[in-house]
Image (cartoon, rainbow, N blue to C red):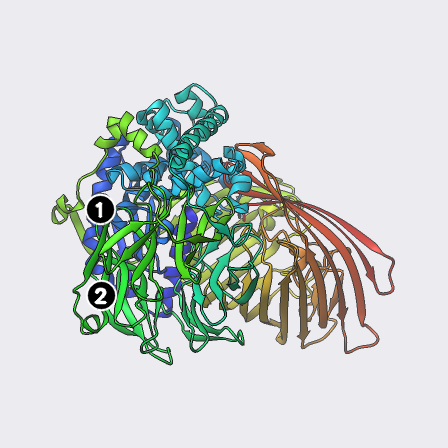
Amino acid sequence: MSTRFQAATWFLTLLVVQSTATAQLRQLETENVRIIYYSSSHEYVIPHVARSFENAWAFHRQLFDYTPREKVSLLIEDFGDFGNGGAENVPRNSIVLGISPSRHTYGADLSAERLFSTMNHETAHVVALDRSSGSDRFFRGLFGGKVAPTDEDPVSMFYSYLTSPRRYAPRWYHEGFAVFIETWMAGGLGRSLAGYDEMVFRTMVRDSIYIYDFVGLESEGTTRDFQVGVNSYLYGTRFMSYLANQHGAEQVIQWVARSDSSRKGYSAQFKRVFGVTLDSEWSNWITFEKKWQSENLDQVRSSPITPFRPVLEEGLGSVSRPYYDSKSGLVYLGVRYPGSLGHIAALNPATGAMKKTTNVLGPALFYVTSLALDEDSRTIFYTTDNNAWRDLHSVNIETRKSKTLQTNFRSGDLAFNRGDRSLWAVRHYDGLSTIIRISPPYDKWDPVYTYTYGQDIYDLDISPDGNHLVGNLSYIGGKQLLVRYALDSLRQGKEDFETLFDFEHSAPLNFSYSPDGKFLYGASYYSGVSNIYRYSFEAEEMQIITNAESGFFRPIVIPGDSLFAFTYTGEGFQPVVIPIGRPDEVSATRFLGTAVAEGNQVVKDWQVGSPRDINLDSLTVYRGPYRPLANTAFTSWYPVVAGYGDDVAVGTRLNFSDDLGLSSLQVKALVVPNRTYPDDERFHGSVDFRYWNWRVSATYNRADFYDLFGPTKTSRKGYSLGINYGKSLIDEDSKKVRYDLNMVGWGGLERLPDAQNRIAPFSELLAAGGSVSFSSLRKSLGAVDDEKGYSFRVFNQNNFVNRELYPRFYTTLDLGTLLPISHSSVWLRTAAGVSIGDRDNPFANFFFGGFGNNWVDHQDEKRYRAHYSFPGVEINQLGGTNFVKGLAEWNLPPVRFRRIGFPNLYLRWARPALFASGILTNIDSDDVRTSAANAGAQIDFRFVTFSYLPITISVGYAAAWPDGLDMSDEFMLSVKILD
């Protein structure tokens, strides 16, 4: 929840600063919500958003007996091509709402009108998180508000728990409840009654796949499975439905609702409500699920199951729409499965041989990429950055050479017209869907038809003769139609279409033409199970042609009177070949959500009215600009502790922020209780102010919490004032480009600001510089670290000391690639630098040495990768005015743990690595040139505490061989707090 809000706020900063359009931020305010938006193009949807919020808010207030003490800040964004949402309650109640159309892939995201459903979901989060008990309200009053945890002062985690304990629960708990209540608020249209969810658990029981307990789900289940984080939604929703079915929906509300008589922890409250431990009831659910799905399987098998021939023995994880190439006899498709980077593959349906064609940067969950095939030119069109603003690329399937055609294409559902070689797609922009046409050479697009808000078109295909386009058309309320357009009429702006079949609320999936153009083949959960359907244009009839146990998807016709399709398995979607036939009978399955509705009249009563019934004019109290600085206000204070030298400082921290975190101020004041300390070093203070991309900071006798532990010390005697400006030019899954500029002045220095073991010959320093970084880093599904790509950075710092200027330049380049071993990679990390100045002046030198990790830390646990690190020697032991350095690293596959620990503290994985490096300094002088080599190992153990806060324990050892000195070694043990 919170990560979504933080990402959206960051993206907003990038967007607005790049357009120099601070004045664009506007707001609509009611007594309950402040809706903030950055584009006038979004104004059309603001009234609907406001009404949907007020509609949901009124429902949750009544359901939870909740009296809010603050307004909700709601950010409207269009930062991705598919809609989403996020919620947070610390330090303030906040929601981010993406207005793009929803994903329809595999029917995994079933909902009513998207903003209506998302608002029901996100307001459920806010109310469940914010509703308080007497003790919560006491600590909120004591600290002046709800405390947000920060790694700079980790004691904030405990204060945060005291002010908002229900925030500290696993994701399956939060998302499971929100999906559960969202479904019934929409009258049963949601994932609690989704065919996809039912299929997942039916298949797990059929294939005897391990069903995780609630600890193993978060420690292993959300990383090893191809669905990764979606499993939190699947398991959580399923468990909530089970509880409602077995114990009643009202008891689910009692569990989630915080009250004066409730327990702080979600698991303790569970035992209070249900009378058994969460662990025990979860086991009962698994037993129930196996019985439920066994009965469903028996029902499906009461009619003959459609036979199929597996093309591969295993599933391929997520898969795109496939295309059969008649010239080669191969099927081209996008695949993404654990241990492999997303890519386009060529698959032989006869032999199962599969070969990679090209990588897909930024692959999406479930659909990987949008594909279209031009057989004649041997070209595949595909999209990248599929989780943000998509780009359009092409690849020649003979030469495997790829080409970027359009950036920020923001379109998908590609379909190729063989008649005129045009490419057609659906573009998502400003919350609307537009059919577009792209003519050769495919470097620009032309709009054809834009749908009104609430309508969405997807899964396009074009007839072999190039005269018609088919697609799935969805409406507000969830109605789904399979429709056909005449392309000539569509290009003239006429919206007339022919309805081929009304699937009601069961989405048609990937209907495509047969090679002769006489039929359409696709899939739907129309019978409860995803089966393949065939539409005959001659008979004007829709026929079901399979009876599946789990589910069939994405059928295409291949030679031999057969269909190439996918069947769902625990490993993802498995390619199969199915004979074209027609079953005598198809049996439906029973949904758990149906049983919940039958046994709980209250869930039917939870259906909310239409947002159109809300009188927005009477609720609106303000319309106008939103100014972050003017809205910056106090959020909380709390006691802090820090290290200074070898002593302890205690004090307080004050926090200020605007609603979106675009403007913030932190002030800390501390004192060393030890009265024997010099008077000018007893007081410690810092101010950190951020506004958009600017940061201004000041310190006096800088103190740091992590200096309590060492060995790295960042506290410094003296005072400083600095300013920084940073800007990301590109921030995509596949590429990042950023620059930073900074200037800082120091006074009263005794030691170098960046080298704790080096005495400063002068007490005053003015430093100015900047950096530019380029990176393209990738990791496969289920990885815990980057596994392939490059990172290149250039740094400059100019030290002005005692009227002398000492310019310094250095650069780093990291290159890595995957090994054939799953989740194992090798990296070469290099650095080189030069400083212009007197070698005897420490301000003109670079310094190296040590792992750099503190016993308790908050910075990167893999500190040995940094250019200044050199494990095996003392911190700052090596130095020089120039240097070259290289490090070779082998990251071994991580070891994941199914269940080691407890609900509030468990081990997720262990990650081992081996490394060796060498360094050469003062290259230009034979007299003072030094060199050193080292080798070492490190293993990191990732724990989770407070149900979701990460803690990493690292153990490392290295031996070093400095030139002219005896071998030295170093042992490192470090506990990293948060990420």
Q: Amino acid at mark 2?
A: Tyr
x, y percent for residue 569: 48, 45
Q: Considering only vertical position in the picture, is 59 above or below 335?
A: above
Tell me: 487 left or right of 898: left
Q: Amino acid at mark 1?
A: Ser
> Which residue occupies the foreground of this view, 551 or 171?
551
Q: CA distance from mark 1 to mark 2?
A: 33 Å
Q: Nearer the viewer, residue 629 or 485?
A: 485
Label 1 crowd (10 A; few <14 / some 14-19 / many >=20): many
Quarter of the image for residue 499 reads bottom left
Quarter occupied by residue 429: bottom left
Residue beneath disc 1: 52
Left or right: 520, with 502 as reference point: right
The reply to whether residue 64 is visible in this rendering is yes
Q: Position of residue 83 (x, y in %)?
A: 33, 54
Query: Count the marks: how many?
Result: 2
Residue displayed at 81% across by 72% down: 928
User: Label 1's element?
Assistant: helix
Q: Nearer the viewer, mark 1 or mark 2?
A: 2
Question: Of label 1 and label 2, which has the lower sequence position?
Answer: 1
Q: Which mark is residue 485?
A: 2
Residue at image position (34%, 70%) is 19
